[in-house]
């Protein structure tokens, strides 16, 4: 019986990894995630960001290219209900341009908007909104909620490049920003890092 439960949980977690990371990154393979999920340390290298990775943020820019040197997930299996899953991203490089970039055809912009809407619907379906199982608070849905609520995100070696040749075509320019690191953690009511 224990083997069936671990297989079910492995499949659920691999699906969560694929759904969350796969929304932003090309090359996330559910089978690869399943193979390494129980080691507690999942490492994926040399990943490409999807062109739609920033679409949900409703920014005035569009992603031209994006690259992750390494994506590592540390999963504390023995303390999953009391310690966070830590996501480490090493070497994030992105190039963005204004949304008004004429090199992106109108049909492509419409296609991206349609894909974003479909992704939202698929995410709601995958989350099982309105299903009886969620109303009853199944073990797996409570566990997934606990994991997502307490994910710690550590990004290091960040390079963001903004390219604009459209505001003043006679004088195109580029601007780059480099950050050593960025961290996001869950906090308590006093803004102290805490497991919630």
Image (cartoon, grey):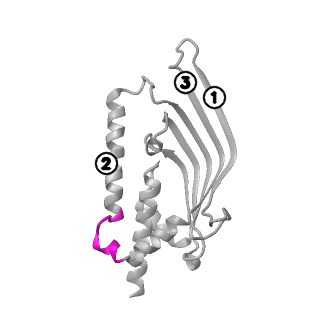
Q: Residue at x 47, y 55 (%)?
A: 21
**Marks 1 and 3 close (CB-CB < 8 Å):** no
- Figure label count: 3
Camera-side residue: 44 or 82?
A: 82
Residue underneath mark 3: 164
Residue underneath mark 2: 118
Q: Residue at x 42, y 22 (%)?
A: 102
Q: Residue at x 40, y 64 (%)?
A: 15
Marked residue nearer the N-terminal end (2 or 3): 2
Instruction: State the residue lying farthest toward the front.
Output: 189
Q: Residues within 10 Å of mark 1 (few under 14, many from 20)?
A: few
Element at label 2: helix
Q: Is residue 179 above or below residue 74?
A: above
Q: Residue at x 40, y 70 (%)?
A: 11
Element at label 3: strand
Residue 135 shown in magenta = yes
Magenta residues (range): 127-136
Q: CA distance from mark 1 to mark 2?
A: 33 Å
Quadrant of res 81: bottom right
Camera-side residue: 97 or 195?
A: 195
Residue underneath mark 1: 175
User: Which disc number belongs to residue 167?
Assistant: none
Q: CA distance from mark 2 to mark 3?
A: 29 Å
Instruction: State the residue lying farthest toward the top.
Output: 170
Instruction: State the residue lying farthest toward the bottom.
Output: 1
Measuring from the top left, give residue 153's x and y in whole percent.
Answer: 60, 57
Residue 67 shown in magenta = no
């Amino acid at each position: 019986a224990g083997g069936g439960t671990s297989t079910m949980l492995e499949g659920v977690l691999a699906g969560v990894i694929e759904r969350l990371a796969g929304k932003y990154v090309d090359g996330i393979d559910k089978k690869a995630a399943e193979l390494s999920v129980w080691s507690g340390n999942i490492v994926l290298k040399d990943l490409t960001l999807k062109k739609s990775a920033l679409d949900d943020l409703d920014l005035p820019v569009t992603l031209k290219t994006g690259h992750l040197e390494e994506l590592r997930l540390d999963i504390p299996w023995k303390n999953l209900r009391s310690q966070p899953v830590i996501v480490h991203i090493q070497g994030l490089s992105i190039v963005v341009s204004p949304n008004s970039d004429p090199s992106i055809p109108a049909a492509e912009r419409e296609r991206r908007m349609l894909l974003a809407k479909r992704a939202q619907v698929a995410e709601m379906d995958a989350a099982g909104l309105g299903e009886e199982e969620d109303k009853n608070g199944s073990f797996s849905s409570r566990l997934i909620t606990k994991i997502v609520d307490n994910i710690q995100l550590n990004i290091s070696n960040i390079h963001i490049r903004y390219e604009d040749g459209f505001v003043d075509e006679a004088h195109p320019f580029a601007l780059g920003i480099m950050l050593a690191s960025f961290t996001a953690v869950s906090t308590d009511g006093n803004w102290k890092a805490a497991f919630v």
